[in-house]
Image: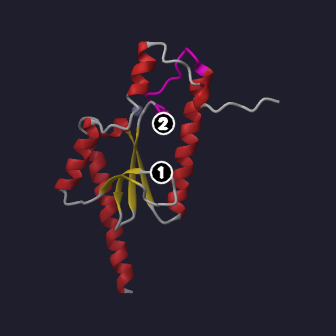
Amino acid sequence: MRPRLSIRSRAPKASSALVRRVMQANTGRTTAPELTLRSRLHRQGLRFRVDVRPEPSLRCSADLIFRRSRVCVFVDGCYWHGCPRHFAVPKQNSAWWAEKIADNRKRDARRTAELRDRGWVVIRLWEHDILGDFVAVAAARIARTVRRRLERRRELEQD
Ligand SMILES: [Zn+2]
């Protein structure tokens, strides 16, 4: 029996302009909304690291890491992570896309679980959660979570 090829090796050629654009958009560049989110958090006095592994043993970097409070934030792209509101399986090569996105979602869930097992609070946001005015809500949620965790740690240390 022939071994099953990996999803990556079976990737459709970037035939249409749309597919090409989507693939190019997935190069890990920081987007403007992400920068807005970071500067908002900064202005609230929060300090964090960007794009590093929360746990060296786990092959996954988070978008924002608050080490002291052990909070990490992922901003998941609506397309690649299969946002229920904005992702639709393309008509061309639909089987491949469906499998690819399902795979990504499974990996996201697995990483979230692994990090939580190691004591991290994991906040997963959609790309659409930080667009425009939504960024204020997202930043407030992150700040609240980080502060609450820091307070709890201080309480524990006093016990
Ligand atoms: Zn979305």
Asked if disc 2 is less than 8 Å from ligand 1, the answer is no
Look at the numbered disc 1 and give the secondary structure of its residue. loop
Q: Is residue 10 in the magenta section?
A: no
Q: Is residue 92 in the magenta section?
A: yes
Rendered location of residue 10, percent (x, y): 61, 25
Q: Which residue is mark 2?
A: 81
**What crowding class fits label 1: few (fewer than 14 Cα within 10 Å), some (14-19), or many (20 or more)?**
some
- Mark 1 touching mark 2, by CB under 8 A? no
Q: CA distance from mark 1 to mark 2?
A: 15 Å
- Toward the right, the furthest residue is 1
Vertical relation: 104 (above or below) 72: above
Vertical relation: 17 (above or below) 135: above
Residue 131 marker: none
Quadrant for ligand 1 reads top left
Rendered location of residue 121, percent (x, y): 43, 60
Query: In this rendering, which labeled residue sits more in front, label 1 or label 2?
Result: 1
Rendered location of residue 2, percent (x, y): 78, 29
Vertical relation: 24 (above or below) 60: above
Look at the numbered disc 2 and give the secondary structure of its residue. loop
Residue 60 marker: 1
Residue nearest the observer in this picture, 61 or 95? 61
Q: Amino acid under label 2? A: His
The N terminus - image quarter:
top right
Residue ID at (57%, 50%): 110
**Quadrant of the rendered structure where residue 148 is?**
bottom left
**Which residues lie in the magenta part?**
80-94
Q: Amino acid under label 1? A: Cys
Q: Is residue 36 left or right of residue 144?
A: left
